C-alpha cells in the first residue's frame, strides 16, 4: 500500500471510530437519563443483570463489532500489515478497502469463507 492511500484509510477509520464513539456516548446518555428519571426506590430494586442487559441492548452489537473491526484495522496500519488478506496474504484491492476500510480478506477469500459458513 502506498503511504498516501494508507493515510487516507487511517483518517477514514479514525472518523468512523469517532462516529461510533459519539453514537455510543449518546446512547449511554439516553440510558443514563432513563435511569436517573426512575424513582430512587425503583432504581435500587433494579437487578444489576437487568441493567447490564439493557445497556448492551442500548449499545448495539453491530456497532460494537464494527468498532472492534476498526480498531483492528488501525492496528494493522500501525504494524504495516494493512491491506493484506489474512487468508492468502495477497493485497486487498484499494476499491474494496475504500468500500469496507476494515476488510481483512480479499474478495475471493471472503466469498469462499462465506460459502463455507452457509
Image (tube, helix red, strand yellow):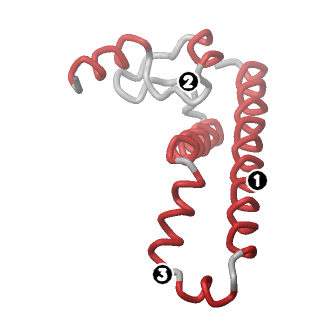
What's the residue at 60%, 35% (across, down)?
80
What's the residue at 72%, 47% (across, down)?
23
x and y, in percent, of residue 36 in the image: 74, 76
Report the disc number at residue 47: 3
Camera-near label (1 vs 3) is 3
Of the image marks 1 and 3, the number of the one nearer the N terminus: 1
Q: Quadrant of the C terminus?
A: top left
Left or right of residue 45: residue 14: right
Residue at disc 1, secondary structure: helix
x and y, in percent, of residue 30 in the image: 73, 59
Q: How many angstroms separate mark 2 from mark 1 (CA)?
A: 32 Å
Query: Considering only vertical position in the picture, is 109 above or below 12?
Result: above
Query: Considering only vertical position in the picture, is 94 above or below 16?
Result: above
Residue pointed to by mark 2:
83
Which quadrant of the figure has residue 29?
A: bottom right
Which quadrant of the figure has residue 69?
A: top right
Q: Nearer the viewer, residue 79 or 70?
A: 70
Q: Quadrant of the N terminus?
A: top right
Of the image marks 2 and 1, the number of the one nearer the N terminus: 1
Report the disc number at residue 26: 1
Of the image marks 2 and 3, the number of the one nearer the N terminus: 3
Report the disc number at residue 12: none
What's the residue at 34%, 17% (across, down)?
109
Residue at disc 2, secondary structure: loop
Amino acid at each position: 500500500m502506498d503511504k498516501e492511500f494508507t493515510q487516507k484509510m487511517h483518517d477514514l477509520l479514525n472518523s468512523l471510530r469517532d462516529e461510533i464513539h459519539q453514537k455510543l456516548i449518546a446512547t449511554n446518555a439516553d440510558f443514563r437519563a432513563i435511569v436517573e428519571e426512575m424513582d430512587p426506590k425503583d432504581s435500587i430494586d433494579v437487578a444489576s443483570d437487568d441493567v447490564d442487559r439493557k445497556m448492551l441492548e442500548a449499545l448495539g452489537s453491530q456497532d460494537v463489532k464494527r468498532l472492534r473491526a476498526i480498531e483492528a484495522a488501525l492496528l494493522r496500519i500501525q504494524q504495516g500489515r494493512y491491506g493484506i488478506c489474512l487468508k492468502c496474504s495477497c493485497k486487498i484491492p484499494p476499491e474494496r478497502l475504500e468500500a469496507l476500510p476494515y476488510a481483512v480478506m480479499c474478495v475471493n477469500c471472503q466469498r469462499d469463507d462465506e460459502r463455507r459458513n452457509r
